[in-house]
Amino acid sequence: MSSLSASRDSVAELAAPRTPATDWAVKVDNLVMTYRTTVEKKPTLKRTLVRLGRRKRIVRTIEAVRDVSFEVPHGSVFGIIGVNGAGKSTLMRTVAGILPPTSGRVEVHGRVSTLLALGVGFKGNLTGRDNVVLGGLAAGLTREKLAAKYDEIAEFAELGDFMDLPMRTYSSGMYGRLAFSVAVNMDPDILLIDEALSVGDARFKQKSFDKMRELCDEARTIVIVSHALKTVRELCDEVLWLHKGEVAMRGDPDSVIESFKEFLDVRESDAADEDV
Amino acid sequence: MTSYADRADRSEFAGEVHVYEPHRIGLPPIGAYLRQLWRRREFAFELARTNLRSAHYNTVFGQLWLVLNPLLLGLVYFALVEIIGRGDRGIDFLAHLLLALFAFRLVSTSVRQGARSVVGGGRLILNTAFPRTLLPLSSVLTSFMLFLPTLAVYAVVHVMADLPVTPEILWAVPIVALLVVFAAGMSMLVATVQVYFRDLSNFLPYALRIWLYSSPILYYAAQVPEKFKPVLLVNPLYPLLTSLGDAVNFGREPRPALLLAGLAWAVGAFVVGGLFFISREREFAVRL
């Protein structure tokens, strides 16, 4: 899409061209992520007091990622696959800087744009437009840049008048389309996508697929977490298979996906247990 | 969130570098954190503005309501005090009541909105890395924007009551600033606690109401009986509200001891609330 590169402002043009100081965009060293979380859906003081009386604790420690290392070269598409609960999303949040590592180190070179599970639209009573602006400002974009990008975002999402309606009126497909559009149009050096390739209808799926291809061609880096193995195989240059927080396998998409599929077939009956 | 590494702002053209490493003492590097906070201040302003807009405060009747609502509330309390009391209060007492009530609402609205700020920011927190303090601070901004029009209401009553206008009235500026700082500290504190105890917002209205009644709003501080004096002295709002009343209602210089106490409460609340929030904020993403 030539309109994209044409509309990019000159500062971004200079910033974007990716004259990388390193060969890799993302480098993860011996990353360990453990966190404590409560089993309760809604933690309340009342229940805490009741529990204290019974001397019961319900905080669980979760070892989500155990000693994972990898690096993602500039301009490549890196896929992360694995069964549910393998630690993929936690790993992505660490790369995005949302969760700090328990130990190890993550280095990211470039402006990151994220599309992690939920995406844009944190206030349902605000319009799509407000949410896009707020999300962009929180992500560190300037007002000028947001104003310049806004039309592109709205157009790509194909929401039309809905942009000025509260987001609670959106269908889930519209939600997903807007979230995807914001993430890819923020002019990122590195795009982190967690299971969002399945938004919208078949046509939008194709459109988002093309958009990602286009980003790759512009030498941007993409890290994808997905269960859609076919898409992963088509898009990715390299795939990492994460199992119970550890690297089970890493290599070219075909061989990793084959092994993963075999593993799934073998443990088909157990696989359901992983759906926690 | 060690992305706020110094290297990140070295050069715009070299792209950005983020390094994420474990936090040692539970706090990210404060200097870098504050820089990042400052750089994204626009977000807090925009969120405050958008929240007001979504509450229709950009319309004529919305703005009228901004003025009417606090005025009606003040009149209700005035009537209440008149009924319970001997009915000998004049308009100068109404001026005291309105001023103290509006100042109190500046704090209580910050606290109430702040409690919801982090829990209500779920998607954004799960998706984007940014200094989370922006959320409760934005609540304080919202509250301050709601406070400004009430000053006009007060000004009218001030003139009607024929109260003095002296240079001492300018003390109101630093005192309101201290109230805002105090409100910010409290807002960050309750925002954090709310993440761990979601029923806090159920208790909060009661706590705020008791706080309102135990503050010198519906009465003058000087009227408080001896046996309730200790309650007044431990109330963080007592020194600030009294100083504000002295400066604005009576046009006299606030007592230095009270100003210092107010300063101590404001700075104390801000530092404690801020550090508590920042030390916990990296956990929010797994707690929401």
Image: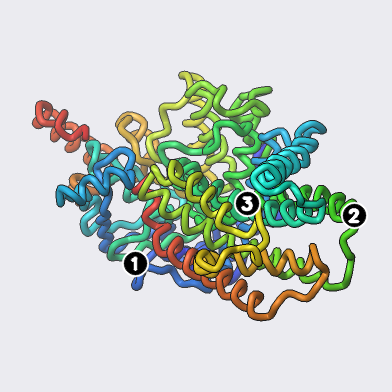
Chain under numbered label 3: B
SS type, badge 3: helix
Q: Are marks 1 and 3 on the same chain?
A: yes
Which of the numbered marks, if any, corresponds to residue B43? 3
Where is mark 1, residue-wise? B22
In the rendered structure, which disc, 2 or 3, sits on the residue that comes first in sequence? 3
Q: Quadrant of the C terminus of chain A?
A: top left
Chain under numbered label 2: B
* Vertical relation: A98 (above or below) B61: below
Looking at the rendered structure, the kind of residue marked 3 is Phe
In the rendered structure, which disc, 1 or 2, sits on the residue that comes first in sequence? 1
- The reply to whether callout 1 and callout 2 are in contact (CB within 8 Å) is no
* Vertical relation: B276 (above or below) B284: below
Residue B144, image x and y in percent? 69, 53
In this view, the residue farthest toward the front is B86
Q: Quadrant of the N terminus of chain A?
A: top right
Residue B253, image x and y in percent? 78, 76
Residue B183, image x and y in percent? 59, 59
Residue B264, image x and y in percent? 57, 75
Crowding near the residue tagged with mark 1, few <14, some 14–19, many ≥20 C-alpha atoms within 10 Å: many
In this view, the mark in front (1 or 3): 3
Q: How is the image coloured?
A: rainbow
Where is mark 2, residue-wise? B159
Looking at the rendered structure, the kind of residue marked 2 is Val
Q: Nearer the viewer, residue A236 or A151?
A: A151
Whether residue A13 appears in this view of the structure is: no
In the rendered structure, which disc, 1 or 3, sits on the residue that comes first in sequence? 1
Q: Are marks 1 and 2 on the same chain?
A: yes
